[in-house]
Image (tube, coloured by chain):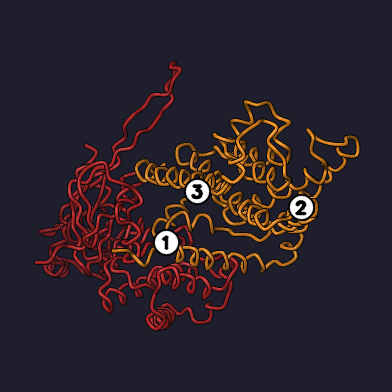
């Protein structure tokens, strides 16, 4: 068994903060724990969603993984390197996209930024050409290559930034809120691209996001962090289970009726002829649908998938307790 | 084993490549570029006009004629203009920290200092460079040239630029500990530069000693100019100092690089 690509063990990061306290002349020095007892590992080729509320320690973690911040405790290795010590060497092997900050040259055509990156990373000419051609095709950036970045739409710029982070064939791509502010079509296209990238090149993806649809569309695995430490690490399905999430069967009856009695499900709401039945997310909907259809005259049926946001909110509130 | 990939020469090349992109970016707005360069030249030009007006009322300044003051002024301005053109953006690291741009740079495989210095490279300061060269060129006519004096003059400009480079980098590092210290740092960098525009003999001895050993701007022009003009130091310092500018440059730059390194390390361990 080879070493995992990202290996985080008992990682800890505290900050010294000076705070003004009423009635005291001098500011008081305080230690704030941003990350503690964090342990997880990521194998090459995984797509991991790293989620948590604001201030949970997500970006502190990513900064330690990229070598920007030195941990105050524990261990972190990425690709066998100590990120903060070998930061520059590691930089060649990772790609980072900060969602709201572009690395592109505002006033120059997209192509110029890419050319500079080719030089900074010293990407072999041929490799660069191939990569650029491939990403431009996948991301549909052809017509934008010669447009000044300032004239690009937000979605185009994000695709440009992602291309910029990938030209040197990084083993890991860290994405921070990659779909923030994008319209539905752009979001969809971006997710499709990331999936293709992972399939084609086995690029490891670590995604921090508030958009849970990103996670649902891309990540087989989620790590949920709250108050600086991991509160869940596993599959998305498992997250549903652990969060006690439910699916909802919406039944439109032919006539108004009192709340139905169906084994394995529970009526949550009745509104005229429409009734909402909830049942555990991992249970099959088939027997419940069959039971409803057998006892009632049904006009229409639909199933609502669980709301992962609610699941996570539930997890957070448990963590706070 | 020597890492061929991180030789200083390579850094200079990368610096040039980044700077070139910024030049092209600025050139997207040619009118603004030209106006700023001309404006810059005019403002710094007025500087010297001020000195000249002063001399219409005085015959000399602490024993130095206008042309001699011109030599001091021109060489210091030229060194400052060179350093400022090359690394002027280093004083903005506080902003880079606040906006997260520094974090972005830290994820690139190029030394941080190279990236910071090359960032937002602007030829706008060509104005100051031209003005300084003109004054320096004019003042040079008063020098009685010998081969050694030419050598000292060239080493004076290069060393002077390096001293300013060191001061800029070193004092900018304060921002790693406390952001928004630009004004404080400017007092030393630009303050030191302003001081060198006059013969240092107008200052009391204590200040002069500080300008030699603490903020070594006396090596930017004062000592080598004394040699060029064939003068002895009114403060009575040894003549050897007149040739010590390269040494002062090396020491200043080394100190600055050490401060920079500990600054970056401090940043990485505070994230502020």
Residue B58 disc label? none
Name the N-terminal-most of marks 3 and 1.
1
Secondary element at image label 3:
helix
Measured from the top left, where is residue A288 in percent x and y? 14, 65
- Look at chain A in the picture and name its colour: red
Q: Residues within 10 Å of mark 3 (few under 14, many from 20)?
A: some
Specify the quadrant that holds the N terminus of chain A.
bottom left
**Relative to residue B180, is residue B18 depicted above or below?**
below
One can see residue A260 in this view: no
Work out how far the residue at label 3 is from the one at label 2, CA to CA, in angstroms.
Answer: 28 Å
The residue identified by callout 2 is B144
The residue identified by callout 3 is B250
Residue B110 disc label? 1
Q: Say which residue appears at 44% left-offset and 46% top-offset.
A: B260
Left or right: A266 as drawn, with respect to A196? left
- Look at chain B in the picture and name its colour: orange
**Contact, CB < 8 Å: mark 2 with mark 1?**
no
Work out how far the residue at label 2 is from the one at label 1, CA to CA, in angstroms.
Answer: 46 Å
Work out how far the residue at label 3 is from the one at label 1, CA to CA, in angstroms.
Answer: 23 Å
> Which one is in front, B166 or B100?
B166
Name the N-terminal-most of marks 3 and 2.
2
Q: Say which residue appears at 34% left-offset and 75% top-offset.
A: A192
Residue farthest to the top, as pictured? A23
Measured from the top left, where is residue B89 in percent x and y? 57, 52
Name the N-terminal-most of marks 2 and 1.
1
Measured from the top left, where is residue A149 in percent x and y? 56, 69
**Relative to residue B263, is residue A200 depicted above or below?**
below
Residues at discs 3 and 1 both on one chain: yes
Specify the quadrant that holds the C terminus of chain A.
top left
Chain ID, mark 3: B
């Amino acid at each position: 068994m080879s070493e995992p690509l990202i290996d985080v063990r008992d990682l800890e990061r505290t900050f010294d903060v000076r705070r003004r306290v009423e009635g005291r002349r001098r500011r008081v020095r305080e230690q704030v724990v941003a990350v503690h007892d964090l342990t997880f590992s990521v194998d090459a080729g995984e797509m991991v969603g790293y989620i948590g509320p604001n201030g949970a320690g997500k970006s502190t973690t990513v900064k330690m993984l990229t070598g920007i911040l030195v941990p105050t405790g524990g261990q972190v290795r990425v690709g066998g390197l100590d990120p903060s010590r070998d930061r520059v060497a590691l930089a060649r092997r990772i790609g980072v996209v900060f969602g709201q900050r572009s690395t592109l040259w505002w006033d120059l055509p997209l192509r110029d930024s890419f050319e500079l990156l080719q030089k900074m990373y010293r990407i072999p000419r041929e490799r660069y050409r191939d990569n650029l051609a491939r990403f431009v095709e996948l991301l549909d950036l052809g017509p934008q290559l010669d447009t000044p970045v300032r004239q690009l739409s937000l979605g185009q710029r994000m695709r440009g930034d992602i291309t910029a982070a990938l030209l040197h064939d990084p083993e890991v791509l860290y994405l921070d809120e990659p779909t923030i502010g994008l319209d539905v079509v752009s979001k969809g296209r971006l997710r499709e691209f990331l999936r293709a990238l992972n399939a084609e090149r086995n690029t490891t993806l670590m995604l921090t996001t508030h958009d849970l649809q990103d996670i649902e569309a891309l990540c087989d695995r989620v790590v949920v962090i709250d108050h600086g430490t991991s509160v869940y690490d596993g599959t998305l399905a498992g997250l549903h289970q652990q969060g006690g999430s439910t699916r909802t069967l919406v039944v439109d009856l032919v006539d108004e009726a009192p709340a139905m009695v169906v084994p394995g499900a529970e009526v949550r709401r009745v509104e005229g002829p429409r009734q909402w039945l909830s049942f555990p997310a991992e249970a099959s909907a088939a027997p419940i649908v069959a039971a409803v259809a057998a006892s009632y005259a049904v006009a229409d049926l639909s199933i609502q998938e669980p709301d992962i946001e609610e699941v996570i909110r539930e997890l957070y509130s448990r963590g706070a307790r | 084993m020597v890492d061929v990939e991180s030789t200083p020469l390579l850094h200079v090349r990368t610096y040039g490549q980044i700077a070139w992109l910024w030049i092209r970016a600025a050139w997207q707005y040619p009118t603004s570029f030209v106006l700023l360069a001309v404006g810059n030249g005019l403002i710094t030009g007025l500087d010297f006009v001020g000195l000249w007006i002063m001399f219409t009322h005085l015959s000399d300044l602490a024993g130095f004629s206008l042309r001699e003051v011109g030599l001091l002024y021109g060489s210091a301005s030229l060194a400052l203009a060179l350093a400022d053109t090359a690394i002027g953006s280093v004083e903005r690291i506080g902003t880079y920290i606040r906006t997260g741009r520094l974090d972005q740079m830290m994820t690139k495989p190029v030394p941080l200092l190279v990236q910071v210095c090359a960032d937002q490279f602007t030829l706008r300061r060509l104005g100051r460079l031209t003005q300084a060269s003109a004054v320096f060129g004019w003042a040079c006519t008063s020098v009685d040239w010998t081969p050694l004096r030419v050598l000292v003059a060239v080493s004076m400009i290069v060393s002077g630029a390096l001293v300013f480079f060191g001061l800029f980098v070193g004092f900018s590092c304060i921002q790693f500990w406390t952001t928004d210290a630009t004004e404080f740092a400017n007092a030393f960098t630009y303050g030191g530069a302003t001081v060198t525009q006059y013969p240092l003999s107008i200052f009391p001895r204590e200040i002069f000693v500080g300008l030699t050993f603490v903020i070594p701007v006396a090596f930017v022009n004062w000592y080598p100019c004394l040699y060029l003009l064939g003068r002895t130091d009114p403060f009575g310092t040894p003549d050897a100092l007149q040739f010590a500018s390269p040494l002062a440059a090396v020491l200043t730059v080394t100190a600055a690089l050490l401060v920079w390194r500990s600054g970056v390390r401090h940043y990485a361990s505070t994230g502020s």
